[in-house]
Amino acid sequence: MSHGHHDHSHHHEHEPVEGSWVDPADDRPLSIARRQFLAGIGVAAGAFTLGARPPAATAAGTPAAVVNPWSGSQRWLAGDHHIHTQYSPDAQYEVATQVANARKYGLDWMVITDHGGVAHQKFSIDQVTPDIERARQANRDILVYQGLEWNIPGAEHATVFLPPGGNTVDILRAFEAGYDGGILSTPVDKGGKGLIARATSADGERYALEALEFLQRQVSSGRTEIALMFANHPARRGVDSPHELRGWRNTAPQVAVGMEGAPGHQAAGIPNSAGGAGDARGYYDKAPDQDSFPGYNPTAAENPYRTYGGFDWMTAKVGGLWDSLLAEGKPWWITSTSDSHQVFGDTFEPGTQDHNATGSRGTPIDTAKPQPYGDFWPGFYSATLVGAHTRSYVDVMRALQAGKVVAVHGRLIDGLDLRVRALTDGDRRGATTGGRTFVRRGTDVEVTIEATLAGGPNFHDVVPKLAKIDLIAGPVTGPAADLDALAAPATKVVKTFEVASSARRQVRFTHVFKGVDRPFYLRLRGSDGNRLTADGGPVMDVLGDADPWSDLWFYANPVFVDVV
């Protein structure tokens, strides 16, 4: 179930080099050290159509082809799919400023996602489109997508974006006009279509499904090669119910592919005494309201409306909502973004232009005084790392669609090579992140993890130290009988690998699942070990006192193992 706007206040040109974190000709501070960032991660580039699950076996009874086969090497491209500009009513920066900073802090791709709504649809889209094109021309070593932060009818927000193309703007314009919750909930006659009472009320849910069907038709008709949707800050207000997540994925499996595992606004928990907003990390400071799913019940021990180590509760809880989707065998991926509106310590404040009347807040104003904002620049703290065929708009989106993604905070790792294979199948390569492999019943399945530790400082000028990696696994039990199921009780941390403090650049771990007799999935997370619960999980972030740099995590998307 999303509100129509944020309800908190946010107190040289070189030719691109494929696979690089930054341009090798670039000598900006930290760029040389970060040039090798993720060079060691091995996620293969096999194509994967989410709408078609491969058969469990061929006619001859042999295992089917592996999805996302392991290759031992991969081009990794860092990006951010959730970034705002002066064309949002609660943000302030020019497109050129956001792009320049994303490039400065090492991103290869980014998505401009200003808030949908009446003013944006009427005015902003015509202003932001040429700004984005100018930024592309001026910064040819970063991919700049045009998108939208969609007010999902009946739910929260989502990133929707397309690759550049002749129909891109027309599709986004029509999508927003017909299906944005902020527009549908206004008292305007929609030709008998009906109105939703509030953007987040349950009577809007059917419009969300219609919207995703619309996007999928744009792909199937050839008007665009691909379109993607990621649900943003899904647990923040408790209005993205489990059945809605399942409905989006089932309705448009090639479009609705995942959610923010870690929301933006990661600086919001920095205390006032340190010049911060003194709010909640991610601005996750909400409580249940009339549109919240009743199954999200805050207790003294657990609160779904808070972040845990900076990650959304749906992702951070082992055996929780994300795992309940994976236990169905559903490819549903997680990301990490900045949600950049107003940057911590920046001296600028919004311009004085009337956004409702013009679709823009105008040129930001320099106050010459650092402001206690809650965001970071794109790439400064959060990164969505994607293993793509090539450094191109469509290939990056294909890789996101296929789940070849690792979400990292604060440069906790520089590489993650994951391989899952059957030991009895000879030289079969097995699968890697986002993939699926097929093994015979009774087979031993080996998991190999190679992590490349940070080879230099992050943008907090500290070299982070990985303390441990958790291997999490659970059975795949098929579609849930209850569409509002939000738990996978059989999913557990099956092994924790401790990283020695003396470890240098590379650490390697293996684990063998013996005599596998049923399908399962596995996923990885890692931590700097600074703030852990008794069972080794992330601690719920404290409102007003959550230093993001002292509690770093990475999460990798799953691998599915089918038994034939």
Image (cartoon, rainbow, N blue to C red):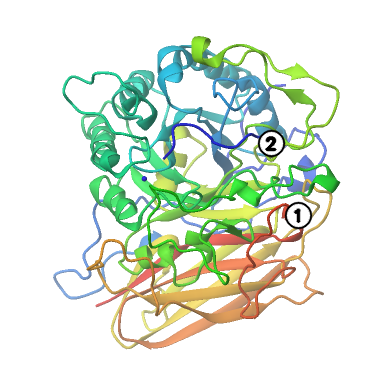
522 and 172: which one is in front? 172
Provide the secondary structure element on which disc 2 rests. loop
Q: Is residue 413 left or right of residue 61?
A: right
Q: Up-down: is 63 above or below 116?
A: below
Question: Which picture quadrant has residue 20?
Answer: top right
Q: Is residue 264 above or below residue 478?
A: above
Label 1 secondary element: loop
Image coords of residue 432 (percent x, y): 46, 63
Q: Position of residue 287 (x, y in %)?
A: 52, 53
Q: Nearer the viewer, residue 159 or 505?
A: 159
- The label on residue 377 is 2
- Kind of residue at disc 1: Asp
Q: CA distance from mark 2 to mark 1?
A: 16 Å
Q: Is residue 500 visible?
A: yes
Image quarter (top left, top right, bottom left or bottom right) of the C terminus = bottom left
Is 132 located above or below residue 20 in the figure?
Answer: above
Which residue is denoted by mark 1 in the rendering? 547
